[in-house]
Image: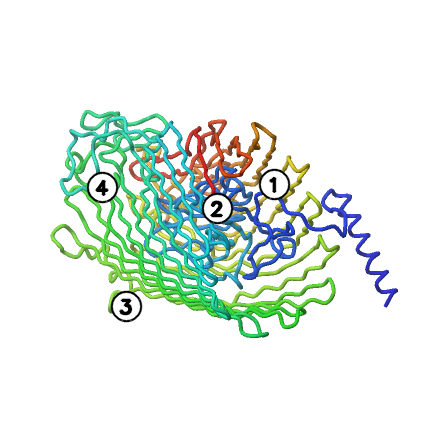
């Protein structure tokens, strides 16, 4: 026995020495220390819930980026899409009004009623599939965990890319009252955040969180929305004024916790309102039909952050969420957790499709005004059973049910009068999963699996202004189903296997194999084609360590990605109509590294770097938007994307941050700086150019001409930084902050696309400087 211990220690020491020589290992046998700003336990260890149980970050054999609500504020991460600024290998772009995250090259590029992303988002443990509602600001957030890689077993549904876990603040064991007010004059940005929580009695705790933010937006209409230009009388868009995309987001969120052992019950309600039309405040930058300089006497916008619309676009959401979580201790067996959730959402939008002051009255046959009203109702039920079985074996078993119905009534005006499309999109899904970890000494072996089944039903009908059915856009015209309903069922088994070995109490190495699954889907528009489910098999090896003020996390990965679901432009239709298709195979590999170091009690440093090679391996029928040399207008062509970079997948990305605390005026002054960079990538369709001709009735790239290096809609990359200076008095009650976002005033593309009306482009927000006051009791 003694000899075996000596051999094991010698092996540990040898491997530790090798890794230390590479600069990644820390000294053994020291107490774990946390990094300021992250979610920490009393002993300083960072605690995460990536495996549906509370564990030290170092003990979870997976790539995880965890950051607390306080750290989000320090880095000026105020919205969901800002997460890409602190998490390498993560990109969050938009298609239309919908947020679409990408993790390590796995992403979704299509949007529409009832559609979902392939990065699962959970808020307080509840699955949120709606890509519009996750667009809200981060309000009263406790922590965010970004799980990189497929999460097919534990967070299974639509998690081929990974999962983002958002946790909001809950009442504590003592009374907490906190309020903050901030203002940035450049765009009249006002924000108020309030939290009150604490115990009502020995068994009951209550908190109420409130949030309000409003600004004028950074887009200006040069014509004040062309108040004298003709416009359809039934259009709800606002005219006059100059703010193209004002922003408003507010919410109220009470939580009630009742502890009557062995049951702990948490009841939560949230009402939120959001109006964010930034993605609809676009301008046309070229290849406009007729190539005019003005319409109806009003010029076209040509400068960045300007528009020339007929009316102010609208993109509103109103959300009610009801959640009930019951944790039941079952003696020595473990804990049963039930999560029951219901969401009701109403959305409305109105936008100027062609982004010019012209109207159907001045150009019959074209479609200019779009929008509509939609509603979504979602019910989820999840039950987990967790047990440790004496410590050597930990087990998690669960059932998941999901029922979602999206209904939309969308309109567009095509010159001959408005048309109405009614869509009813239903999804029903269930899953069962089992995951267990067994450890012998310093060796941990995890095996798990999940079976998922999804069913989707879609019915759509289109009528003209007189109520007459337009058969060419009726679902029944595109399916053999006698009732006009398109149906699709998909299922999958997604296992995982992980082995972890502790080199020291504070460091380990691991290897994993896991699978992810995104359900098959049906297009939300004609021709309502069905797509096969996408699946990914991921291999990862990693190393984690924490000692004193030093923390290291490095992982190398390889993905075999099959049947990824992408949007395309139909080359057979003159108005560049979108459709969906499966891309075939993709190959993804890379490395993620994060190092953080608490140099002293006053100085903290952190750096993350990611290399990502994400390429389509088999995508011969991709579509590009190219310019017709004869007409100068956009047209779509079929060509090969095999070997091309997957959208939202920069080869290199990284971030670095530093904060320093100094004594000042009887309190503490904290200087914080956060920088990020990204190399070239495409926000959606890269639009690779080629010479093309009509082949079998379809415009297709001529052989040998579709190998041009860069797409015309790709972003070349960027470097930007946020910073702040905050002073807190000695009582820790009052904090005064001066902040700046996008210090270098770097502008990068957030949305680019080529359609019939021209090239559309939008950029990120310019530099903003402001201040805030926070009060705590």
Quadrant of the rendering where the N terminus is positioned: bottom right
How far apart are labels 3 and 4 at the CA level? Answer: 32 Å
Q: Position of residue 216 (x, y in %)?
A: 32, 33
* Mark positioned earlier in the residue sequence (3 or 4): 4
Question: Residue 481 bears which disc, if any?
Answer: 3
Q: Secondary structure at mark 2?
A: loop
Please, what secondary structure does the residue beneath circle 4 have?
strand
Binning the other alpha carbons within 10 Å of mark 3 as few (below 14), some (14 to 19) or many (20 upward) gives: few
Q: Residues within 10 Å of mark 1 (few under 14, many from 20)?
A: many
Residue, disc 4: 369
Per the image, label 3 sits on a secondary structure element best described as: loop
Label whose residue precedes the other's in the sequence (3 or 2): 3
Depth order, front residue of 149/490: 149
Front-most of 251 and 425? 251
Instruction: Tell me how far mark 4 sits from mark 2, CA to CA.
Output: 33 Å
Query: Which residue, given by chain and number where applicable, does mark 2 sit on?
Result: 641
Q: Give the vertical position of 51 relative to 655 (above or below).
A: below
Residue 278 in view: yes
Callout 4–callout 1 Cβ contact below 8 Å: no
441 left or right of 653 in image: right
Query: Which-is-in-front pick, marks 1 and 3?
Result: 1
Kindly identify which residue carries mark 1: 609
Q: CA distance from mark 3 to mark 2?
A: 34 Å
């Amino acid at each position: 026995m003694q000899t075996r211990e000596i051999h094991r220690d010698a092996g540990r020491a040898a491997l530790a020495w090798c890794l230390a020589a590479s600069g990644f290992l820390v000294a053994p046998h020291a107490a774990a220390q946390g990094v300021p700003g992250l979610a920490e336990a009393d002993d300083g260890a960072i605690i995460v819930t990536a495996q549906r149980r509370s564990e030290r970050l170092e003990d979870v054999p997976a790539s995880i980026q965890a950051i607390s609500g306080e750290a989000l504020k320090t880095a000026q991460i105020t919205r969901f899409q800002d997460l890409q600024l602190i998490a390498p290998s993560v990109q969050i772009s938009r298609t239309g009004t919908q947020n679409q995250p990408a993790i390590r090259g796995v992403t979704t590029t299509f949007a529409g009623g009832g559609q979902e992303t392939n990065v699962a988002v959970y808020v307080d443990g509840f699955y949120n599939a709606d890509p519009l509602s996750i667009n809200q600001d981060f309000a009263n957030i406790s922590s965010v965990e970004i799980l990189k890689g497929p999460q097919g077993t534990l967070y299974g549904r639509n998690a081929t890319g990974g999962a983002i876990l958002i946790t909001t603040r809950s009442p504590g064991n003592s009374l907490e009252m906190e309020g903050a007010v901030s203002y940035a004059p450049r765009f009249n940005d006002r924000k108020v955040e309030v939290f009150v929580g604490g115990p009502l009695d020995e068994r009951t705790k209550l908190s109420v969180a409130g949030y309000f933010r409003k600004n004028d937006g950074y887009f200006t209409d040069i014509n004040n929305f062309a108040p004298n230009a003709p416009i359809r009388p039934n259009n709800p868009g606002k005219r006059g004024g100059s703010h193209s995309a004002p922003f408003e987001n507010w919410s109220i969120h009470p939580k009630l916790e009742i502890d009557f052992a062995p049951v702990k019950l948490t009841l939560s309600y949230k009402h939120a309102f959001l109006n964010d039309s930034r993605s609809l405040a676009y301008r046309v930058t070229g290849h406009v039909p007729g190539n005019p300089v003005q319409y109806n006497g009003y010029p076209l916008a040509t400068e960045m952050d300007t528009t020339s619309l007929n009316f102010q676009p609208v993109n509103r959401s109103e959300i009610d969420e009801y959640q009930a979580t019951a944790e039941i201790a079952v003696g020595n067996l473990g804990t049963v957790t039930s999560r029951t959730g219901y969401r009701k959402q109403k959305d409305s939008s109105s936008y100027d499709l062609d982004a010019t002051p012209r109207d159907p009255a001045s150009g019959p046959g074209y479609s200019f005004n779009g929008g509509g009203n939609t509603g979504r109702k979602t019910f989820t039920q999840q039950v987990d059973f967790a047990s440790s079985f004496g410590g050597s074996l930990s087990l998690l078993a669960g059932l998941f049910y999901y029922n979602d119905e999206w209904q939309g009534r969308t309109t567009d005006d095509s010159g001959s009068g408005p048309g109405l499309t009614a869509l009813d999109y239903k999804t029903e899904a269930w899953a069962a999963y089992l995951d267990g970890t067994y450890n012998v000494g310093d060796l941990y072996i995890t095996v798990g699996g999940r079976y998922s089944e999804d069913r989707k039903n879609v019915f759509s009908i289109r009528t003209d202004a007189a109520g007459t059915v337009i058969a060419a856009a009726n679902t029944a015209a595109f399916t053999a189903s006698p009732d006009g309903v398109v149906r699709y069922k998909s299922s999958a088994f997604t296992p995982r296997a992980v082995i972890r070995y502790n080199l020291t109490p504070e460091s380990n190495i691991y290897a994993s194999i896991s699978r992810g699954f995104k359900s098959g889907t049906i297009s939300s528009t004609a021709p309502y084609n069905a797509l096969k489910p996408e699946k990914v098999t991921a291999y990862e090896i990693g190393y984690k360590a924490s000692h004193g003020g030093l923390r290291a996390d490095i992982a190398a990965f390889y993905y075999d990605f099959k049947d990824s679901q992408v949007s395309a432009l139909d080359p057979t239709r003159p108005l560049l109509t979108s459709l969906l298709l499966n891309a075939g195979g993709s190959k993804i590999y890379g490395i993620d590294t994060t190092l953080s170091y608490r140099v002293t009690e006053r100085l903290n440093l952190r750096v993350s770097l990611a290399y990502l090679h994400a390429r389509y391996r088999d995508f011969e029928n991709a579509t590009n938007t190219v310019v017709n040399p004869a007409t100068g207008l956009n047209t779509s062509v079929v060509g090969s994307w095999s070997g091309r970079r997957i959208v939202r997948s920069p080869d290199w990305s990284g971030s670095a941050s530093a904060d320093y605390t100094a004594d000042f005026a009887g309190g503490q002054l904290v200087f914080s700086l956060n920088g990020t960079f990204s190399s070239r990538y495409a926000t959606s369709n890269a639009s690779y150019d080629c010479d093309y001709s009509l082949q079998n009735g379809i415009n297709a790239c001529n052989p040998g001409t579709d190998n041009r290096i860069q797409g015309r809609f790709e972003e070349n990359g960027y470097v930007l930084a946020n910073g702040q200076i905050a002073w807190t008095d000695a009582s820790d009650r009052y904090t005064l902050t001066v902040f700046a976002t996008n210090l270098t005033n770097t502008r990068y593309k957030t949305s680019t696309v080529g359609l019939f009306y021209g090239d559309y482009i939008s950029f990120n927000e310019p530099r903003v400087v402001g201040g805030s006051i926070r009060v705590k009791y």
